[in-house]
Image (spheres, helix red, strand yellow):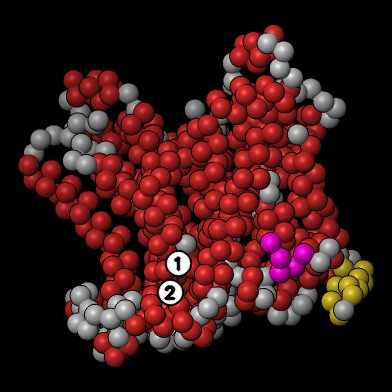
Amino acid sequence: MMPAILILGAFVLLPIFYAVFLSLHKVQLLGGINYEFIGLRNFQRLFTDARVGIALRNTAEYVVIVVPSQTILALVLAVTLNSGIHAQNWWRVLYFLPTVTSSAVLTLIFMWIYNTDGLLNDFLSFLGLPTYNWLGDPSVALKGIMIMNIWSTAPFYMVIYLAALQDIPQRLYEAADIDGANWWQKFIYITIPLLKPVTFFVVAIGIIGTFQLFDQSYIFSGGTGGPNNATLTVVLLIYQTVFRYLQMGYAAAIAFLLAVVIITVTILQRQLFGGERG
Amino acid sequence: MKTIPNFPWLKGLLYIVIISYAVITLIPFLWALSASFKPLSEIINGEPNFLPRHFTLDNYKQIFLQEPLFLRWLLNSVLIAVSVTGLNLLFNSMAGYALARLRFAGRNFWFFLILAVLAVPAQITLIPTFLILKAVGWLNSYQGMIVPSMVNATFIFMMRQFFVNFPKELEEAGQLDGLNTFGIFRYIILPLAQPALAAQAVFVFMGSWNNFLLPVVILFDPEMFTLPLGLNTFKGQYISYWNYIMAASMVFTLPALCIYAFFNRYFIQSVTFTGGKG
């Protein structure tokens, strides 16, 4: 039973202490590794670095839009599927498809759809709506990633909601019928409150996942976070700081900043939902 | 099943919602599939025709002939994902069982530690992991990909929760029959833990198969690339040859889709399983 602890030790605990150590040093990687103790200067630099601000803002904007959208979409889809339609299982299998597809593949497919003369713009102009340069225009590039990820992760949460919906005792709805409640009232007063623990779970996982956005912006921008830093996320910035600018210590400091943000938001969310699951 | 009033228009509306979302789910896949059978001229043309006018298999021929590494990437991905999954199942369940049942020095301390590890985002340990792998010379190798992901705190925790609620009588019966701890684990615990193990296997496999961050950091020799990384390089080489890129994407997606087609029940069950456990 010890191997697990050994490996966790070597690749989780040791790295955490190592990361603390790194974040307090200026690290140079020229052949060997050189450490120079600089105290908290890496952390001070966080506050003056414009790109840290941009990455945080992009990531926050992404979380604030994607988490509620995917949660609501997942709930709507789950309720629709659970309303006694035919072949429920087949629809579920079909909807789940994007979730099992590699993010690299999905990103490439969407990059092509987002092309200036791609499918999405064809569709928009067909409807008489304005078209965009989805990949090259800083004002919409991040939106493109948002749409793609809402589309690809909502089905995952839908499956969780669907299971929870099927656990709600039927007699509650029957009692409400006797009291003359309509469909909407039953949804608001029975379904939503009983789903609260699941919603807590879905939102918590959603927040943690969205804050770590990396693959999609890396592939979208070829690793640059462009156009004009529009798709620069915190994790992408960490990656760049390590492998482009070779500043391991500073990158570790950014990683700690991200950890603090994620943990703070998760705790806040817990407070907001008023305690734990029932 | 939740009963919805039998207004025909409402029923119709439900089906419209369900079918439209199915279309939204499928369109990107179908569009990519159709592009992979089109010649480049037809793609540049920009017409939104889903059925290729000049059906061709040249794109597939081209990528297999021009990219001899294709099969190699596939092999790398399979090898890494299968090893990571197998090792995770073994170590996580052993550690989970130890934490749930065995008495050993510092058990509570280890449990607390694993809970703490759960809260630390992977980005913090990424840079130290890179440096550690560099120090032991495992960059750009299979060990480098496999060993750091061999255990997972989330699933140790999940397995512990699962084993804690396990009826003790079964293990006591095993003891009476003369089994030692390992025998009990092997012949009684593991067979009964199958649903938990299946859920874990699905998640670990998908995570490893689609992982982008770890390989992008530690693999640099094209021979060692995994599929997502290979695909990204491929895109870099054939920038606007969307016919080749889409054909490659389809080749990459197919194995995952086949697995999903056969095991979709387990995929969906596993999502439900973890969701329910919260």
Residue B19: quadrant of the picture: bottom left
Is B139 included in the stretch rendered in magenta? yes
Say what amino acid the circle numbered 1 marks.
Phe
Residue B207 or residue A116, whichever sits in front? B207
Say what amino acid the circle numbered 2 marks.
Ala
What is the secondary structure assignment of the residue under circle 2? helix
Q: Chain of mark 2?
A: B
Q: Which mark is residue B248?
A: 2
Q: Chain of mark 1?
A: B
Residue B165: give x, y in percent of width and height: 59, 21
Residue B33 or residue B122, whichever sits in front? B33
Residue B180: give x, y in percent of width and height: 74, 19
Question: Which region shows up in magenta?
Answer: B138-142
What is the secondary structure assignment of the residue under circle 1? helix
Please say if A189 is above or below B242: above
Q: What residue lies at 78% left-to-right and 71% top-to-bottom? A: A248
Q: Quadrant of the N terminus of chain A?
A: top right
Residue A157 or residue A37, whichever sits in front? A157
- Circle 1 crowding by C-alpha within 10 Å: few under 14, some 14–19, many from 20: many
Is A204 included in the stretch rendered in magenta? no
For the residues labelled 1 and 2, say whether their Cβ atoms are less than 8 Å apart: yes
Left or right, A32 with reference to A62: right
From the image, tell me which residue sits under label 1: B252
